[in-house]
Amino acid sequence: MTLWVPIAFYVAMTVVVPILNGSPVDRAFIEHAGVVLVAVALVVVLAAGGRRLRRYFSSESTSAAMRQSPSQRQTRA
Amino acid sequence: MTRWRAIDVALVAVALAAAYALKRHYSDDGVDQLAWILAPTAALVELVTGTQFVHETGIGYLGRESFFIIAKPCAGVNFLIVAFAASVFAFVRGRRTVLGKLALVAGSFAGAYAAALVANTIRIAIAVELQPRLAELGAAARERVHHGEGVVVYLVALLLCFVAARRVLDGPGRRPA
């Protein structure tokens, strides 16, 4: 499962619930919502980048293992 | 993916009802009624920063040397609610037995409470450290920095908790209870 569940709950609790509770959507609230959404976007971008890097390095190590000669593989085993 | 069963839906509903009750308690009650989370938070901040905090009725916990107040917004109750509700929602289907599901709900609350204490402590300790450096800024700018720092600390703590919980509950080689 992805991190969408906690992110969705976090945005709901910090932005949607106050609006439903009747908080005034004034400048301060828009600033608060902006900070929350920018932080969420930043975390999503960083998580996606981290996942791509991990995938890249794991595929690199797999192809490096495939490039090894059978004798080398036997020696390691 | 495991399908939703009636017991799962019922337990998520219970978790959401508990979250709603907690939110009402946080909104309606004063700072002194939040001692169950503010007192241990103040104790942990004292331990980390070395700043002494004393309880002031109706205000919160006042750091006499730093003039920093641990007030109602520092309680992290919204974080606790999100961590608890999101954990139950995400992991309840993976537990096989009713006992396992009930243990998940109880464990999610205990874990969310502990995580809230740690996140509160980190957030307040950073704010206490930053306070002298931000002294020349205006009150509004200081408030903005404190707010932004809170959003980042709580969001990162929430995601780290979720990743840790996922490893513990659904990690490789583990059979759901």
Image: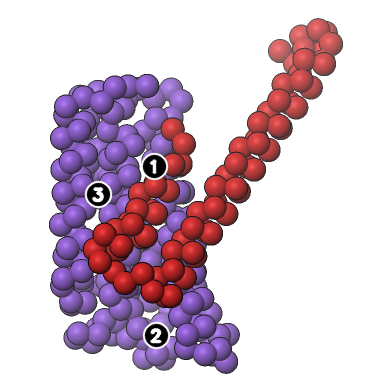
Q: Do the residues under discs 2 and 1 have CB atoms within 8 angstroms?
A: no
Q: Which sits in the foreground, A32 or B58?
A: A32
The image shows residue B24 at horizontal and vertical percentages of 17, 63
Could you classify mark 3 by the number of other residues whose Cα lies within 10 Å: few (under 14), some (14-19), or many (20 or more)?
many
- Please give the letter of the chain rendered in purple: B
Horizontal side of B25 relative to B94 (left or right) equals: left
Horizontal side of B22 relative to B162 (left or right) equals: left
Residue occupying image coordinates x 71% and y 32%? A57
The image quarter containing residue A77 is top right
Q: Amino acid at mark 2?
A: Phe
Q: Which sits in the foreground, A20 or B157?
A: A20
Which secondary structure, mark 3?
Answer: helix
Q: Can the viewer see residue B156 in this picture?
A: yes
Q: Do the residues under discs 2 and 3 have CB atoms within 8 angstroms?
A: no
For disc 3, the marked residue is B109
Q: Chain of mark 2?
A: B
The image quarter containing residue B92 is top left
Quadrant location, the N terminus of chain B: top left
What label does residue B17 carry, if any?
Answer: none
- Please give the letter of the chain rendered in red: A
Q: Chain of mark 3?
A: B
Quadrant location, the C terminus of chain B: top left
Q: Nearer the viewer, mark 2 or mark 1?
A: 1
For disc 1, the marked residue is A5
Could you classify mark 2 by the number of other residues whose Cα lies within 10 Å: few (under 14), some (14-19), or many (20 or more)?
some
Residue occupying image coordinates x 57% and y 44%? A47
For disc 2, the marked residue is B68
Q: Amino acid at mark 1?
A: Val
